[in-house]
Image: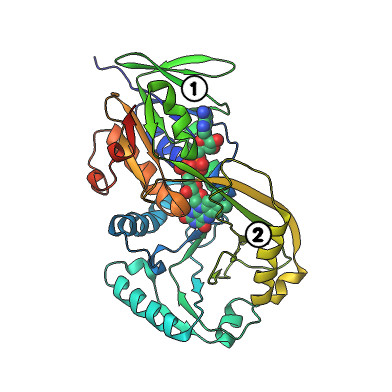
Amino acid sequence: MTQIKRIAVIGGGIVGATAAFYLSQKNYEVAIYDDGVGQATSAAAGIICPWLSQRRNKEWYQLASKGAAFYPQLMRDLNEPLNDSDIYQQVGTLVFKKKPSLLKKLEQLALKRLETAPEIGEISLLSPKEIKAKFPLYGSEESALFASGGARVDGSLLTKKLIDQAKSNGAHYYPEKITLSQTNSTEYLISSATQERTYDTVVLAVGAWLPELLDPLDLAVDIRPQKGQLVQLHLHEDMSQWPVIMPDGEKDIIPFANGKIVVGATHENDGGYDLTATKEKLDLMLEEAIELAPGLKNATITGIRVGTRAYTSDFAPFFGAVPGYPNLFTASGLGSSGLTSGPLIGHMLSQIISGESTDLPLSNYPVEHYIKKR
Ligand SMILES: Cc1cc2nc3c(=O)[nH]c(=O)nc-3n(C[C@H](O)[C@H](O)[C@H](O)COP(=O)(O)OP(=O)(O)OC[C@H]3O[C@@H](n4cnc5c(N)ncnc54)[C@H](O)[C@@H]3O)c2cc1C
């Protein structure tokens, strides 16, 4: 008789939560461990719109665009409504550029990408008046490119739903920080302040903390942290159909159905793992956002979120098996688009562990480029 796999998923951000959710639907024993401190997923802004990015890396684009396309399937698998959910909704995205010629260029790119990514939806150049009709707080004279397939996602609500569903499928959830060691060639020991357990399969979905997790196994990891901060506001408005606003720069504006509006985020390469909020940076972002959308002045500040993104030295993400360590799997380096690609990556990790073919070729995201024996 074959033994049931005992799987520990370390990290309850978007990657770990999705992997645990899909694994818990199979005949495995699944445990999720999550420290939660500095988690990028719960701090994230929530923009899903990879098609209008001018980044040239083909593998990144394939992952991010397939990741965006995967969301409707994830919502169906979670029994969430597609058009009326606080978690995820395609409300469209408005992208701004400094010059009309750059906006025209972006429209050409979007139309080209539409040929292979119908999820972009309808593309149109909107006048300031048309923008205001969609986003009543708008008060600037700039035009923008609208893509109706753009979406917003609430990372915290999504991971909560995924973990709750995994728990109802029998998974265990431990909100604890752990360390990892290998007991023998087929078993890993997970230790926390309160317990020690062994598993035959481990998924390390720990984002920016992968170097410290793999240090005891004598593995060096090419991952560096990047600090991100944003402001959370509240407005007494029904914003369920309002689009996401992406101006040139850092002050994206993301309205949610429940009255929440997020403005941000910063990209601070020298911030490391620091989680202190910096008033000047947040004030500046807010000021810039108010210039574009003066109606934001009436919103109340309800919170500040700070999280840590994970980057590789060439900005590319990786996922799959850790070479030299049987049944040890990982994903990291998702950078600033991890809410977009994370669910698909978590799904693919579950496919690898179950011996199924993956949604995308693993060779394009090679773990061995980023994790090396010391
Ligand atoms: C401010 C900000 C805004 C962003 N906005 C967007 C956006 O609009 N769109 C987009 O697509 N992406 C966005 N991102 C990027 C996205 O949030 C991340 O790429 C993605 O969430 C990474 O997911 P993850 O599961 O790999 O890591 P994380 O979400 O960081 O999860 C890792 C988890 O592992 C836990 N962990 C670490 N070490 C241990 C340990 N030893 N034991 C137990 N648990 C441990 C951590 O505490 C954490 O909870 C943003 C990020 C930030 C910070």
Q: What element does badge 1 sit on?
A: strand
Q: Nearer the viewer, residue 261 or 250?
A: 250
Say which residue label 2 marks. 258
Q: Is residue 41 visible?
A: yes
Residue at horizontal 42 percent and vertical 32 percent from the top: 204
Residue at horizontal 55 percent and vertical 72 percent from the top: 247
Residue at horizontal 44 percent and vertical 81 percent from the top: 103
Q: Is mark 1 within 8 Å of ligand 1?
A: yes
**Mark 2: which amino acid?**
Asn
Q: Nearer the viewer, residue 263 or 209?
A: 209
Q: Is residue 237 above or below residue 312?
A: below
Q: Nearer the viewer, mark 2 or mark 1?
A: 1
Say which residue label 1 marks. 179
Mark toward the start of the polypeptide (2 vs 1)? 1
Residue at horizontal 46 percent and vertical 28 percent from the top: 213
Q: Residues within 10 Å of mark 2 (few under 14, many from 20)?
A: some
> For this view, does 97 lie left or right of residue 264?
left
Q: Nearer the viewer, residue 185 or 314?
A: 314
Q: Residues within 10 Å of mark 1 (few under 14, many from 20)?
A: some
Q: What x and y, as percent, mark residue 350? A: 34, 37
Q: Is residue 154 above or below residue 363?
A: below
**Mark 1: which amino acid?**
Thr
Kindly indicate the quadrant of the structure image that contains residue 104. bottom left
Q: What x and y, as percent, mark residue 302? A: 74, 55
* Count of all numbered marks drawn on residues in the image: 2
Q: Is residue 121 above or below residue 71?
A: below
State how far apart marks 2 and 1 are (Cα): 38 Å
Q: Residue furthest top?
A: 184
